[in-house]
Amino acid sequence: DAGITQSPRHKVTETGTPVTLRCHQTENHRYMYWYRQDPGHGLRLIHYSYGVKDTDKGEVSDGYSVSRSKTEDFLLTLESATSSQTSVYFCAITETSGGASYNEQFFGPGTRLTVL
Amino acid sequence: KQEVTQIPAALSVPEGENLVLNCSFTDSAIYNLQWFRQDPGKGLTSLLLIQSSQREQTSGRLNASLDKSSGRSTLYIAASQPGDSATYLCAVNPGRGSTLGRLYFGRGTQLTVWP
């Protein structure tokens, strides 16, 4: 257990409203990621972070922003939710040991978001 | 861009069979490869991690092999049980520069083991 929690676990919202999802980790991992999982597409990277205030885009970043002001928290924001953003969102961390040569990734329990 | 393919997409077998799940990737310059299990409505559980320098990893009844040059990995499940029923995902880590640690996923193999 890599100590990853996500909140909320389920959310239903309406088109056009802002939504923020939170990922919290307790083990001081440097690298954190946000993925979305959709039928027919599998898991795709939205944004990732390689340190406090250091973030970068993944392959499906349009319509999403992220922030990381503390090591333990990585926030994903949908500025104006659309129905195409209905999905299951997973947060992940990379656990490193023995330097950068390990890099096993662990996932949180997910947030199921429905945009009506 | 790295593309990951998993075959078959679904598999249904009787209990006790030995299984092979396949994963192929287009760019052989990988850092490591990770196999996950996902139960319906749940998150991903890491099963095995193979570094690019390794040929295989074992955990209990699971054995994963890696042939980097041919862009293939297999997950072998011995003596399958109904509790093994889940979706198995293969993910490749290209490990280059600032993308270190990001994963490219296959779409998974949905396994059903019936008693």
Image: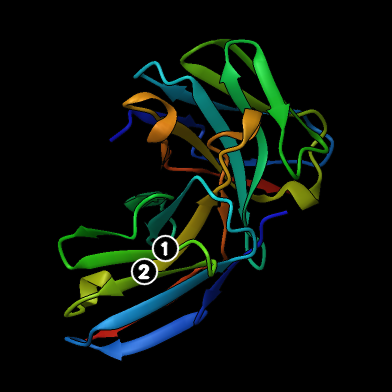
Left or right of A79 in this view: A43: left
* Residue placed most toward the observer, A95 or A82: A95
Residue B74 screen position, x and y as percent: 39, 71
Please give the chain letter of the residue carrying mark 1: B
Left or right of A61 in this view: A32: left
A76 is higher (above) or lower (below) than B66:
above
Residue A109 screen position, x and y as percent: 42, 42
Look at the numbered discs 1 and 2 and tell me whether their residues touch, using CB distance below 8 Å.
yes
Q: Identify the image quadrant of the N terminus of chain A.
A: top left
Res A80 quadrant in image? top right
The residue type indicated by label 2 comes to Ala
> Of callouts 1 and 2, which one flags the residue occurring earlier in the amino acid sequence?
1
State the residue at coordinates (35%, 79%): B20
**Residue B40, disc:** 1
| Most distant residue in the bottom direction | B14
Do marks 1 and 2 share a subunit? yes
The residue type indicated by label 1 comes to Pro
Q: Which residue is mark 2?
A: B86
Res A24 quadrant in image? top left
Residue A111 screen position, x and y as percent: 53, 42
Residue B67 visible in the snapshot: yes
Does dot 1 land on a helix, a strand or a loop? Answer: loop
State the residue at coordinates (61%, 36%): B96
Left or right of B79 in this view: B69: right
Residue B73 screen position, x and y as percent: 44, 67
Which label lies toward us, 1 or 2?
Answer: 2
Q: Residues within 10 Å of mark 2 (few under 14, many from 20)?
A: some
